[in-house]
Image (cartoon, helix red, strand yellow):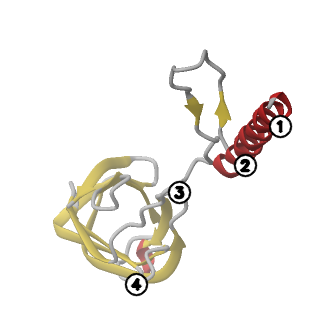
């Protein structure tokens, strides 16, 4: 009878040991030991950080500026600015020069980490020589953009859209 009881206890211990080993292999977490009858605490396995990148909405973004209107166009794949238009309403004065008309330039200015910089040559559509530097940053939702414009380092302003 004692041999049967020892055999039963031994088999029970082996079964419990196998279950503990199997649970550790499948669960991936660490189990802390506790006295019998109490619940054990399981630590979840470490998880990798997930970086979510939201691209800006494709299409036209319009901003009112000191000189008139700025329109930037985000490409269909949302990875670049495909066109920039500057509409000088009235006659905007900068460095004693009056600028009027509209300048539209098509190119591909990349959007990297939600930011872009574009140099627009004014002589393409106006009689003024020089360039305007347009800088912008999209917010984390991809639904708002703001930035600066700079003509010759003399006439500087900010813009935002929507």
- The residue mark sitting in front, 2 or 1, is 1
How far apart are the alpha carbons under marks 4 and 3? 17 Å
Residue at the extreme front of the image, as rendered: 1
State left or right for residue 83 relative to residue 118: left
Q: In the rendering, at what x and y percent does residue 147 appear? A: 36, 52
How far apart are the alpha carbons under marks 3 and 2? 45 Å
Instruction: Name the residue carrying label 3.
Output: 113
How far apart are the alpha carbons under marks 1 and 4? 73 Å
How far apart are the alpha carbons under marks 1 and 3? 67 Å
| Residue contact at pointers 2 and 4, CB within 8 angstroms | no
In front here: 22 or 67?
Answer: 22
Instruction: Name the residue carrying label 1.
Output: 7
Of callouts 2 and 1, which one flags the residue occurring earlier in the amino acid sequence? 1
Position of 78 relative to 54 (above/below): below
Of callouts 1 and 3, which one flags the residue occurring earlier in the amino acid sequence? 1
Instruction: Name the residue carrying label 2.
Output: 22
Of callouts 3 and 2, which one flags the residue occurring earlier in the amino acid sequence? 2
10 Å crowding of disc 3: few (<14), some (14-19), many (20+)? few
Instruction: Name the residue carrying label 4.
Output: 76
10 Å crowding of disc 2: few (<14), some (14-19), many (20+)? few
Of callouts 4 and 3, which one flags the residue occurring earlier in the amino acid sequence? 4
């Amino acid at each position: 009878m004692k041999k049967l009881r020892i055999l039963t206890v031994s088999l029970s211990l082996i079964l419990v040991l196998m279950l503990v080993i199997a649970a550790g292999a499948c669960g991936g977490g660490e189990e802390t030991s506790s006295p019998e009858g109490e619940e054990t605490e399981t630590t979840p396995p470490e998880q990798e950080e997930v970086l979510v990148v939201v691209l800006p909405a494709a299409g036209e973004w319009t901003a009112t500026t000191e000189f008139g209107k700025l329109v930037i166009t985000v490409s269909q794949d949302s990875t670049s600015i495909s066109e920039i238009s500057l509409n000088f309403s009235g006659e905007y004065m900068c460095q004693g020069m009056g600028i009027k008309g509209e300048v539209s330039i098509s190119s591909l200015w990349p959007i990297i980490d939600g930011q872009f910089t574009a140099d627009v040559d004014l002589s393409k559509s106006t009689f003024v020589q020089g360039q305007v530097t347009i800088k912008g940053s999209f917010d984390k939702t991809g639904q708002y953009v703001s930035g600066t414009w700079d003509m010759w380092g003399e006439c500087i302003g900010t813009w935002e859209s929507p």
